Image (tube, rainbow, N blue to C red):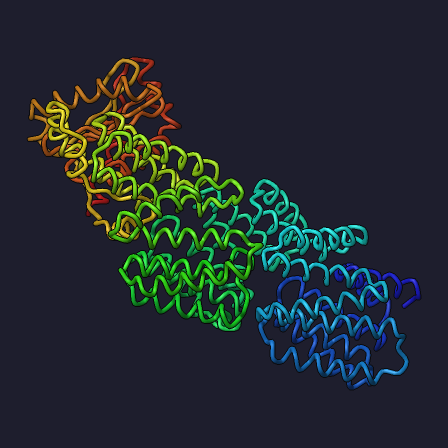
Amino acid sequence: MSNNQYIEIDHFIAHGKYVEALDIISSIKKERELSDKEILLKKFIMIYIYLDKGEFQKGKDAAEALIQESQNKNNLLFEIDAIIGKIENIINLELFEESFKLIQKAEKLCKKIKDLSIEELKRRESYLEYLKGRIYQEEDEIIKALNSFKQSLAIRKSINDEIGMIFSLISIGSLTIGIGNFKEGEIYINDSLKIAKKLDIESGIIWNLINLGWIKFHMRELNEVFSIAKECLSICEPKDYMRPISFCYDLIGSCHMVKGNLTKALFFFLKSLYIRIKMRNNNLITVSYYCIGNVYSRKGELKRCLSYYNKGLKTLGLNKRKMSKPAYLSVVGKIYGELGDFEKAKKYLLEALDLLKDNKIILYHHLNFTSSLTTTLHYLIILCVNNNDLDNANKYLEELDKISDKYLKIKQIKQIYRLDKAIILKSSNRLMDKMEAWTIFKGIIDDLEINDYELTIEAMTHLCELLIYELELTGDNEILYEIESLSDKLLEIAKKQYLHDVLAETYFFKAKISLLNLDINNARYLLTKAQNLANKFELVQLAKKISNEHDSLLTHLDEWEEKIKKKTPLLKRVENMKHEFLFSKTVRTQIEELPNESDTPIYFVILSSYNGRCIYSKAFEDISVNDGNLIASFISAINIFGKEAFSSSGTIDRIRHGEYLIVLQSKEDYIFGYVFKGQSYSAISKLDTFIENLAQITNNFGTLDSYIRSHREISLETRSSIEQLLNKILTYENN
């Protein structure tokens, strides 16, 4: 090998371009047999090619082979470099104890080398110190990790090892982000990225982009996150760098999660999970399970989300993570609390609390994990209040107060303390305590200095409950106006923060307020709006609950109309209504336990919205279509729907007639009507599915359009296709 070729290979290795380095050696092999040194060099390069591809076991095997061969040839330098390569791979296999032993071995070997320059020796010493930090980081030993990374950075600066500095800076930045100092973390990451781009160090660019993406995510600069992830994937995907690809998918999924696009979020989290299962990386598999569990929690599918959280807890890697495990335990405890299992909830939350106290870190972010001592105490206080365990609630509140006094600069901790104090006061039977709680909640809502929408929303929901309590006592219309004003502010926050579940629940709540005001049409409009929103973002359980409430309203419509006639006083109306609101344990539990009730088809029709012409109809029960009152009601429903469906409000999507319900949907130039017995939710879901499938088999209704334009009846073939589709969706799914 010529001197120029050695220089070129060394340059490629230093810049992380191992494939290019291998190409040079392969070209030499075509011309002649490789020398001993060239064979060792080729094996060294393969260690890092496997590392970049995420094939860590192959990387480990290649490193072990090189260690053995280096020992046989008495090549101490290659042995040290092979050990470093092995450590890089086995850290990803979570073999941390073995990694530490190898570091100690390599440090001893470094002292034996006599003919190595001080600069090259320090380069390897700094690398080994950096790898110590990596292991500490994987085990969530945050302080130890930071110290090792800073030591490695100092050594690398002393020898002007810019390439090494890139990775020390990345790691320091990553941990600084982890403890919540996003701005400071961004400085480290940008410094590292600047060097990486200047030297064209691909791996440095990749990991800096990923860390920068998480900074922007936590600062809610979501458009920048998408852009960063796209840039990173453009580097990684062509070269099949699986580990960073999985992190990019996490970033994209997390952004979709924040925006309420839960299906897209789940898609990317599952893609990330499949990569990590393939890589057998338990530490990262736990991250994926956590993300997927969060999606199902947002969807209101609490038992399903628990199954993923429990998978994460059982995954071997989690037991080695001192900060990630409390995050899991805390969120599992919270979910059990919402499901009403007090003992299990308390067990998980107390275990999380003990671990967090042992770690002596009050807040730590790892990707989209957040381990927080204050949040865990908050969950415990809520749990105790909901179960009338006020002694323990006050005990945890005292702990929170001490933490807030200790960390005065973190104003959110004081705000959490104030919120929890107000929640405890609100649970009191004494009017004075409730009044004090009212003042605190109002103060949190009006505090513009702390921009924490989660705290604000929670304060708003509790204040609404206090106002409803006051309304029940007084029947004062002014209080109703206050509640409406507060719910309007809540809508603004939900829209701004893409909280589609909160948005749907708030519309649902406002529908109940409209009922109290005896504005039935507006109540129905808001119920329809809430359900459409829940359906759009696949909040299935919530959509089902809202739909059932709408059905119940139609069942009792005569009673509400009677109240309007009699001008029933507000106080009396309040007494007759049962109130639920947003995030309360009761609502979440009831949503989870909704029965899977279905519908029985009676009659189906497709009409032209242009001229009212019947294109297709089918009766499922002869007796129903002979019911003159039912047909009259159906025609009346279509007349009303014809006006409403194309108006801006679109309030009508169902009408009740006796034991029958009629749902109507418009699509393109057609109205689809379905008469049935049972629950509207399943009926509307089936109707939506039918319309979607019909559009596919009729060229987006083009086939039907041709019959309308030519004033012809639909063909037997088209009728048969509609019939088969209808039977499959409306009748088969009931079996």
Regarding residue 411, the answer to whether it shows in the image is yes
574 above or below 155? Answer: above
Residue at point 51%, 40% (across, down): 448
Position of 202 compared to 654: left or right? right
Viewer-closest of 295 and 427: 427
- Residue 330 position by quadrant: bottom left
State which quarter of the image contains the N terminus.
bottom right
Regarding residue 289, the answer to whether it shows in the image is no
Residue at point 76%, 59% (across, down): 17
Task: Give the percent coordinates (x, y) of residue 150.
Answer: 73, 66
- Residue 149 position by quadrant: bottom right
Residue at point 63%, 56% (across, down): 240
Residue at point 13%, 28% (across, down): 568
203 above or below 103? Answer: above
Q: What is the number of callouts on the image?
A: 0
Task: Give the percent coordinates (x, y) of residue 235.
Answer: 68, 50
Task: Give the percent coordinates (x, y) of residue 274.
Answer: 50, 59
Q: Residue furthest front?
A: 432
Viewer-closest of 341 and 80: 341
Task: Give the percent coordinates (x, y) of residue 548.
Answer: 22, 40
Position of 652 compared to 355: left or right? left
625 above or below 730? Answer: above
Viewer-closest of 652 and 340: 340
